[in-house]
Image (cartoon, helix red, strand yellow):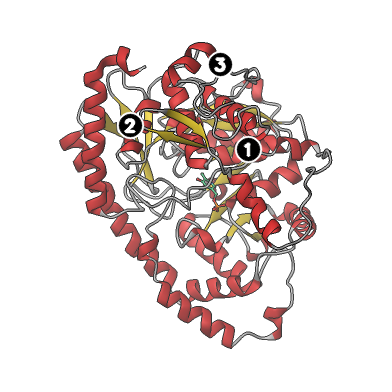
Amino acid sequence: MSRRSGFPSLALPPREPGATASQWLCAALRAAILDGRLPRDARLPATRELARQYGLARGTVLGAFEQLQLEGYLRARVGSGTFVNAVLPDDLLEAPRQRSGRVVRRDGPPPRRLSALGERVRHLPGLESRPLRAFRANRPALDLFPVTLWAQVTSRRIRRATTAHLLDSGPLGLGDLQQVVSTYLTTARGVICEPGQVVIVSGVQEAIDLVARVFVDPGDRVCMEDPGYIGAAQIFEAHGARIGPVRVDAEGMVVPEARLNDARLAYVTPAHQFPLGVSMSLSRRLALIDWARTTGALLLEDDYDSEYRFAGRPLPALQGLDRHGVVLFAGSFSKVLFPALRLGYLVVPPDLVDRIAAAKSVIGQHAPLLEQAVLADFIREGHFGRHVRRMREIYAERLDVLQEEATARLAGLLEIGGIDAGLQTTGWLGGDLEEEAVALAAARRDVEVVPVGRYARRPMARQCLQLGFAAVDVPEIRRGARELARVLEELSAEGPRRRS
Ligand SMILES: Cc1ncc(COP(=O)(O)O)c(C=O)c1O
């Protein structure tokens, strides 16, 4: 395939049930690039052509191209089209091995036999390498983290480290950290637990994996909010689960309908639904616990960012309302401190502690002890509480600015949803604006918004964007709002025919 010739027609595998058009297209194009059907430097078909060929909205194709550009598989050249990159991200992963001078096979590796999980597991894209800009979701304001203070606590802890810190610990983690986390969760989140029920993990992601390993067999059904957190769905699917999508309304995830009563587990984000941002009402929480009790399912509560509550009375965690031992509660220091820390917790009912401990002991033993000890000091000495209080004020101000800008500039184009907690919110698009087309046009103006349809398994009734407000400062939020207003005005003026 010469560099200049366009692709005649591209044969992609059929869409699997359950995958959104955008997920399917991204996966199919990525696979075609990796197995060489789309060679390096090849030009991709025009988005319009690809959309026509596969009966997709053009916005879906544009969105998939943008995603693959972000992942490093594609590059776009203004006026000449979109091309496969000459160097793929997968090459870069190979590079250190080749540079180290060890054996480099010229004839390629032998055919690999993967396990079913190895076949199913998918890469969860990270955003870390991209510069921070409005409206990055899922990220705290890392420039405001007290790094010097953290360094002081760390160096003091290391100076005082005993051989106990150099030895390994039990699989549940450092006793000291279990203790302070349990006190914190009891007072701040209304969780009811003893320190021995707290399993220290390397973030919610590990907690979900641990729960899936222990409670989900291939073919089992797992209920998930729709739209919901892709990172959780990917783990459950890697373990062979069938996802049962459950609708989300203004009170949070609805109680799963009767045909989903065979589910082993339901994954929920009650404090701040991901990605829509609603807080689950008390009556819904109680109804969900009742559903779990009567069906025998477990509930996995992901409390990933609820420390930041801006409005309303804090509702107790689902776990704190549970009198039947059906809720497992997971949370993380990724959003409240910094994501590179990779520390979080899973609170399990007392009778399940041994099972989880056994699984954790064979999988990864325990999280690094010195970091756990530093974190325990940081919390116990009051730095954690002060940091959360300070950040809550800053994030509340940033959310106010976003809402104020939206009222001034985005009225009729984007309606920002009210949220009570968290680091991001959603905006409902007005008129016939398409979320994928908006995200793409916004990215060209250095503004990041995530189409909520990317998190949905079934078509959404309205087009919606996820907008983070915590990671960047007020001037950047204002810049983002100005640029987004321009994008929405331009797209509205173009009208639906020219846009799609
Ligand atoms: C809803 C949700 N749950 C869990 C996670 C993973 O968190 P952690 O960094 O603790 O693994 C994320 C990450 O962004 C998330 O958005």
Q: In the figure, 117 relative to 433: above or below?
A: below
Q: How many labels does the image show?
A: 3
- First in sequence: mark 2 or mark 3? 3
- Picture quarter containing residue 239? top right
Q: In the figure, 329 relative to 73: above or below?
A: below
Residue at horizontal 62%, vertical 20%? 12
Tell me the quarter of the image containing the C terminus: top left
Residue at horizontal 55%, vertical 75%? 374
**Label 3's element?**
loop
Front residue of 412/382: it is 412
* Residue 2 visible in the shown view: yes
Q: In the figure, 280 relative to 363: above or below?
A: above
Instruction: Kindly identify which numbered label has been placed on residue 441.
Output: 2
Q: Which amino acid does label 3 sit on?
A: Pro
Q: What residue type is labelled 2?
A: Ala
Front residue of 418/448: it is 448
Residue 265, image x, y percentages: 67, 36
Residue 7, image x, y percentages: 54, 20
Within 10 angstroms of label 2, few (less than 14), some, or many (20 or more) residues?
many
Instruction: Kindly identify which numbered label has been placed on residue 234.
Output: 1
Instruction: Kindly identify which numbered label has been placed on residue 286.
Output: none
**Label 1's element?**
helix
- First in sequence: mark 1 or mark 3? 3
Q: How far apart are marks 1 and 3 (CA)?
A: 33 Å
Front residue of 156/180: it is 156
* Residue 269 visible in the shown view: no
Q: What residue type is labelled 1?
A: Gln
Residue to which mark 3 is pinned: 8
